[in-house]
Image (spheres, helix red, strand yellow):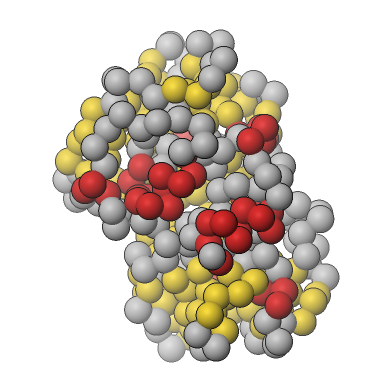
Amino acid sequence: MSVWVGPIGGLVRAFCFGCHTLIALDGKLKRLDEIVIGDNISGDVVVGVCEFKKDTRDQYYKIGDVYVSGMHIVEYNGEFIRVHSHPRAVRVDYNLPIIRCLITDTGRLQIGGTVYCDYLGDNVLETYLKIVAPIVKIPFQLDDYKNSALNLYPAFTQDSIIHVDSGIKLITDVVIGDKIAGKEVIGVIRYILEGKTFITEYDDGYNMCKFVGIQIYRGDKYTVRENHREMKILGKLECIGLVVEGGVIELSRNMRIVDFDIIGDDLRRDVEDALEKLYLD
């Protein structure tokens, strides 16, 4: 039940909404781009907010006040289907350059009486392992993450410093359109973690980072090194995930890590097949 396989620039942003989407919150209507971490949407608590560069090939639909991509997953008559197959979905032109999604503690979003998947789909360990299985074997015991797989996705702590092509930036200042080793940042995910995660530290004089989650390194092949340290989180840990062209963040010649999307462009397959296998089956 995830979105992490697909063609270049496709499935990464297949589970997204237009920022004009209206959401009832505290007796008021708010646009989706006004929602923040901690908001409670009909019982679904927001733990992450995501924004992406819109692919011009994406098809968008409207269901009530909701602008949503046609490949998004929605509940209808007790089953999950794609938005483009929903009988009330009306195809629309949506030309804004940025699209958005949310991550909730339930994996669901109830908007206008309709239930949608959030960005991760279900946030369980089984799905996470399906994502990484085609490229690498994880050498750690992960049973404690059965219901909190978000803690395993590769990202940065908010105090990390990263070298982008225009100079050195705090990770919180990285925006869509920045480039890292010539590859454009096409997505930024801001989220919080609780419980525990894996921490890996890296400092080459330009990049001074604390990575969270399971870091998958790219050389001639994908590998997971043994230098991860499992850490108990005291309170809440604020994190930033990046999605870049090609799926690999090249911090230096010797440090190339997969982005939050996990599976790089060279391993992505057809959107329809991926959703069938990971979600709708």
Residue 77 occupies which quadrant of the picture? bottom right
Horizontal side of residue 106 vs 99, given as left or right: left
Residue 120 x/y as whole percent = 48, 57
Q: Residue 149, image x and y in percent?
A: 35, 50
Residue 14 visible in rendering:
yes
- Tell me where residue 97 appears, x and y as whole percent: 74, 55
Q: Nearer the viewer, residue 212 or 135?
A: 135
In the displayed structure, would residue 166 be above or below residue 91?
above
Say which residue appears at 29% left-offset and 45% top-offset.
237
Image spot of residue 200 (x, y percent): 32, 26
Name the residue nearer the viewer: 272 or 74.
272
Identify whether 100 is placed above or below 167: below
- Left or right: where 157 falls relative to 207: left
The quadrant of the rendering that contains the C terminus is bottom right
- Determine the residue positioned at 24% across, 28% down: 229
260 vs 121, nearest the viewer: 121
State left or right for residue 225 relative to residue 134: left
Q: Residue at x 62, y 67 (%)?
A: 72
